[in-house]
Amino acid sequence: MSLAAATLSTQRESLLEIDPGLGELLPPDRRRAAFAGLRVDVRRVSRGPVDLARLEAASAVNIGLLVVEGVLLREVVLGDDVSAELLGPGDVVRPWTLDPAGCLVDPEVRWSVLSEVLEAALLDRRFAVELAGYPEVNVALIDRVNGRAVRLATSQAISQVNRVDRRLLALFRHLAERWGRMTPDGVLLPLRLSHGMLGALVGARRPTISAALGGLTRSGVLVRRTDGSWLLRGDAAEALRAAAVPRVEPRRPLLVPPGSATVGA
């Protein structure tokens, strides 16, 4: 399914209305001007695989795609191994490259929408012209790209931890910093993450993941709820509660429907 074919609707909206955090460096008067002047096409894409080939063939002048709502899975396939990345509100994805040359290691990249609907703003050439008058917003966008790079580096470090149960606990804490919700019982992670997907996120095979999850659930540190979401309890939850990490709040629940992942359950 291509992005164009999967698009449910397109509407040009105010960038700062759909993502107010991008205007935090603007003084009030310039924020009001940017609210009216910076507008983007918002694409709504249904759940399932997404083929970005058509976008990749578009003009490299386009800045990229800003995820507004939903969950996007990026899988990098190298031989029999799969590495995964979860993207959500606030992330910037750039399918275009200025260097068309291939590389010696040429993995396959797969994209899938895991939520019922993904909303993404197309930061196109028209938006780039408007953005020139608001360097503060440009700085905020670059900061989003940098934040994604930091999370990827953290994920790489997690995959190097010497025990899979410790990798999983670190991963759940890492994901909960962004998507977690505080509850009286612990930190709720409203994502259905299959054993196969967890393996791709931490660099382990599915049977090893299942065994490690069994130990964590028996100890009470992790609880898998009947709706498929996860509850992080104990010291890990208390550390997250104390940190009170700010995050982008979605307008819809992020819970991933069962069977939506391309990685096995």
Image (cartoon, grey):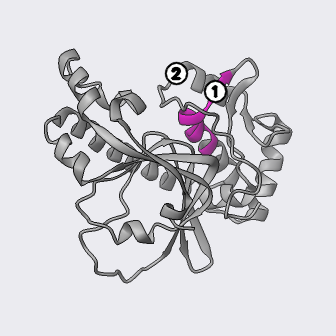
Q: Is residue 133 magenta?
A: no
Q: Which mark is drawn over residue 181?
A: 1
Q: Quadrant of the N terminus?
A: bottom right
Residue 81 appears at what percent x and percent y?
60, 73
Q: What residue is at 64 percent from the left and 34 percent from the top?
A: 253
Amino acid type of the residue tagged 1 in the rendering: Arg
Amino acid type of the residue tagged 2 in the rendering: Ala
Residue sticking out furthest to the left: 133
Residue 260 appears at what percent x and percent y?
70, 56
Q: Which residue is mark 2?
A: 244
Query: In this rendering, is residue 241 above or below 204?
Result: above
Residue 10 vs residue 185: left or right?
Answer: left
Q: State the SS at label 2.
A: loop
Disc 1: CA contacts within 10 A as few (<14), some (14-19) or many (>=20): some
Residue 75 appears at what percent x and percent y?
55, 64
Q: Nearer the viewer, residue 256 or 155?
A: 256
Q: Quadrant of the C terminus?
A: bottom right
Which SS does the magenta portion mostly show?
helix
Extent of the magenta region: 171-182
Q: Nearer the viewer, residue 161 or 189?
A: 189
Q: What residue is at 42 percent from the left and 70 percent from the top?
A: 54
